[in-house]
Every structure is written in C-alpha cells, then in structure tokens.
C-alpha cells in the first residue's frame, strides 16, 4: 500500500525528495484505498502532490559512498564522547578564567595531556550556541563525532555560519 502513494523519489547529494499523492494518502489514512487503485499510476497533477524532503549527507566509506540520513527522532540520546569533550573544554576555560596565574601548560601537566590538545579543546566553548545545544540534545549531524570535532578544531572558523557549514549543521 505504501507504493500506491509514491509518485516520484529524487535522490540528490544533499537531500532526498519524496513526492506522494495527496488523494491516495487521504484514502489510505481513511482506510478506503482499494487494490485496483494501488495498481493504477497516480495522477501527477500539481495540486495532488505532497513533497517530503529529507536532508542527507554523503560520506566515503572505503571505495563506496554512503548516504547518511539525519535522525529526526527527538529521543536520540546525546553522544557521551561529544558531551565529555564539551564539558571538559568549558571546565578548563572556567579554571583559566577563575585563576589568572594558571596556564594551559600547568593544566596540561596536571591532566597529563599535551598543551596542543588543550589549545584545540579550548576552541570548543566558542562554538555557535545552537551547535552546542544541538549536541547536548542529541540533534547533531550523523557524521559528527568527538574525534571528528577534535580533528576539525584547528580549522574552526570564528563565524557561526561557517562553523555550521564545516560541522555539517544546516
């Protein structure tokens, strides 16, 4: 019965457009669609069309390309690794602000990490607020991981729009 609704599916590099028959969708929801109608081609009249657009991304996986569909589920748990590095970055920034005598090198020695790692980490409190909120709420692009974020921090632009683009937020 789902196939009876479909008029067209367009797959693009940044999205998938699904066009459905409004009339058939109404009939399906009302429970009045019959088998004969399922076998007929849907009308392609513009006023009968409903277009659904799903944002996607392409990612190379070895020799092939994979299409990543963004998760629209509101109940998606936040990525613990991303939360951990964001919390650590904000904690270190707060320590530096509250103790002006403390240096990044002091904290690096104390935490047994490199100063370069901490300098990268200290860029994260400057993420666009909506990016931080999305990560906390589990609404991040599927390709964004803690490892990816840390790899991209040296190139992290100051502008929020550029950050969204670099990190895969729309």
Image (cartoon, helix red, strand yellow):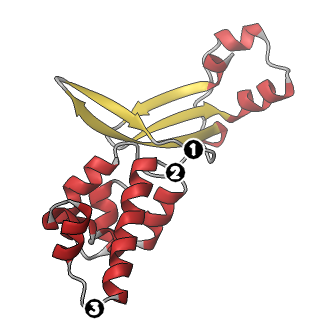
Q: Residue at x 86, y 28 (%)?
A: 30
Secondary element type, mark 3: loop
Task: Give x and y (percent) for residue 61.
Answer: 23, 28
* Quadrant of the image occupied by residue 1: top right
- Is label 2 in contact with label 1 (beta carbons under 8 Å)? yes
Task: Give x and y (percent) for residue 90.
Answer: 39, 72
* Quadrant of the image occupied by residue 63: top left
Quadrant of the snapshot with the C terminus: bottom left
Tag nearer the camera, 2 or 3: 3
List the residue tagged with mark 2.
138
Q: Residue at x 30, y 66 (%)?
A: 163
Outermost bottom residue: 100
How many other residues sit within 10 Å of disc 3, few (<14), some (14-19) or many (≥20)? few
Q: Residue at x 37, y 64 (%)?
A: 88
Front one among 87 and 56: 87
Task: Give x and y (percent) for residue 126.
Answer: 33, 75
Q: Is residue 130 left or right of residue 118?
A: right
* Quadrant of the image occupied by residue 20: top right
Marks 2 and 3, how far apart in space? Answer: 34 Å
Secondary element type, mark 2: loop
First of labels 2, 3 by sequence position: 3
First of labels 2, 1 by sequence position: 1
Marks 1 and 3, how far apart in space? Answer: 39 Å
Q: Is residue 112 left or right of residue 12?
A: left
Q: Which label belongs to residue 130?
A: none
- Is label 1 in contact with label 3 (beta carbons under 8 Å)? no
Q: Which label belongs to residue 100?
A: 3
Task: Give x and y (percent) for residue 116.
Answer: 13, 65
Front one among 141 and 58: 141
Front one among 43 and 26: 26
List the residue tagged with mark 1.
76
């Amino acid at each position: 019965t789902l196939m009876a609704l479909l008029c067209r599916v367009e797959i693009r590099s940044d999205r998938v457009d699904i066009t459905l028959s409004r009339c058939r969708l109404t009939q399906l929801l009302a429970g009045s669609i019959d088998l004969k109608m399922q076998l007929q081609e849907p009308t392609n009249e513009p006023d009968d069309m409903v277009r659904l657009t799903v944002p996607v991304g392409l990612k190379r996986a070895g020799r092939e390309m994979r299409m990543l569909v963004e998760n629209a589920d509101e109940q998606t748990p936040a990525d613990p690794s991303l939360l951990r590095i964001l919390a650590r970055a904000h904690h270190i920034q707060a320590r530096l602000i509250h103790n002006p005598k403390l240096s990044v090198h002091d904290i690096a020695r104390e935490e047994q990490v490199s100063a370069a790692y901490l300098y990268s980490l200290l860029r994260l409190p400057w993420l666009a607020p909506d990016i931080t909120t999305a990560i906390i709420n589990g609404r991040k692009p599927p390709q964004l991981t803690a490892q990816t974020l840390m790899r991209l921090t040296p190139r992290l632009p100051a502008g929020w729009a550029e950050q969204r683009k670099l990190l895969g937020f729309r």
